[in-house]
Image (tube, grey):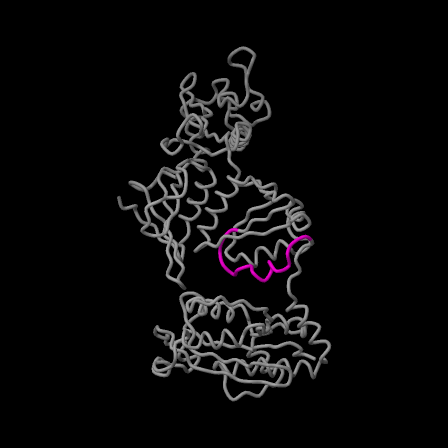
Amino acid sequence: MLFDRPCAIVDLETTGGHITRDRITEIGILFIDGECVERFESLVNPGKPIPPFIERMTGISDDMVGQAPEFASLAEELWERLQGRLLIAHNVRFDYGFLKNEFRRAGLTFQSDLLCTVKLSRRLYPAFFKHSLDSLIERHGLSLPSRHRAMADAEAVYLFLGHAARELGDETVAREVARLAARPVAPPGLDPEVMDRLPDMPGVYLFFGDDDMPLYVGSADNIRSRVLAHFSEGKGKERHARIPRTIRRVEWRETLGEFGSHLMELRLVRSLEPLVNVRGRANKDLCSLQLAEGEDGFVVPRMVYAEDVDFSRVDALYGLFGNAREARRVLKDLAEAHKLCQARLGVETVTSRKGRPCSAHAVGKCRGACIGKEPAMQHNARLMSALARLKVKSWPYPGAVVIEESDEVTGEMVEHVFDRWCYLGSRVKGGDSLEGVPMFDRDIYKLFTAWMKKPQANTALRLLEE
């Protein structure tokens, strides 16, 4: 039987497609218990204007929702009725995301097993390219009085499921439904109930093995999806593939956004030193290149170490390397690519008499700075050009800055504070204490500079007010 468990076919109309900024304007739900089908539909006051193109598409106007109930007044009844049901929708993550956020605004935590009829249609009818609801209605001749209204679209999904069962057989449809809606299986040794508690929120997750040994720390914009991906067999690198076989416990810590989750991940990797993590571990051999004047007017890159020099206070640095060997390898590759003299750069030591060519010159990979064929000024200019892409950026602000990250659903805000590439800590907006130790860190530098290159929807940067 297709509906052998309580189900709810849901469709929502909204003010737009952003699951946190936009709000619900109409709800249509079919509560299905075997042969019994109950319908619930209601306009919803979104508390914000409906854009004109959305009004044209759905036919729902500001006047229509002006006297409609707000979702908060419907939340408790809907939350109770949806408990334990399989939530079915066309592109179910869209409807599920809106419902979760509306319930959160009402102080309720909502979680449900899901079935996406887009995915189901692809499995049942793989010969067809299009699987939008309009395509399904036209292809299968589903008769509906209207479209782009919540209940009408929920009815269309119900009709599609019935049509597929009649055309392909109950068993075929039920088998594919069971595969798509199957509850994730916990790895051996892990409490299965943890799978139900994983949140659809950004944050950090932690895996522990026998004797509570830290195995892995990761960050995610959706903790549940990322953790379940780890448990899928045959995914990822070998060291990650071993995790499910040894995991005994899972922890997670929610954050307000993705940036905060990356910061927390780095802090936890530093403190816990998990077995599998490679990136993010504390680096005591961090070094860079600094230019100094060498013999005969040639500029020479010199190695400097973070334990000796405060990288946050030095402007002319080139590259951030985990150790001296990495720095020398990069410098050697740079010299070969740009035909710079490795002897003049200190990569190769010429032990014979002065003026003898370096080994790279013999194979055409040096323009002769070692034997006087290329002047120091010209060699220096080419070296500076080659090093330009490695230059560590200067701090572009007059002082410390704050990156604000907010939850558009609850209104919570957190501040991440930085000064001269050093992470000073995070705090609830307006708080006094900062959790963090001021230090220059290569991974923090990379995280911050990467963030600067792209606009962030839920973050804003401002100077720290003293």
* Spot occupied by residue 129 in the image (x, y as percentages of width and height): 62, 72
Q: Nearer the viewer, residue 379 or 395?
A: 395
Residue reaching furthest front? 211
Q: Quadrant of residue 14?
A: bottom left
Quick check: is 466 in the magenta stretch?
A: no
Q: Is 381 left, or right, of 173 in this rendering?
A: left
Q: Is 126 left, or right, of 379 in this rendering?
A: right
- Above or below, comparing residue 190 to residue 151 in the picture: above
- Above or below, comparing residue 153 to residue 177 in the picture: below
The structure residue drawn at horizontal position 43% and vertical position 65%, both measured from the top left corner, is 20
- Above or below, comparing residue 413 to residue 263 in the picture: below
**Mainly helix, strand or loop, the magenta region?**
loop
* Spot occupied by residue 33 in the image (x, y as percentages of width and height): 61, 81
Residue reaching furthest left? 466
Q: Quadrant of the C terminus?
A: top left
* Spot occupied by residue 291 in the image (x, y as percentages of width and height): 41, 26
- Above or below, comparing residue 359 to residue 51 in the picture: above
Q: Nearer the viewer, residue 329 or 28?
A: 28
Quick check: is 202 in the magenta stretch?
A: yes
Magenta residue span: 189-204
Q: Quadrant of the N terminus?
A: bottom right
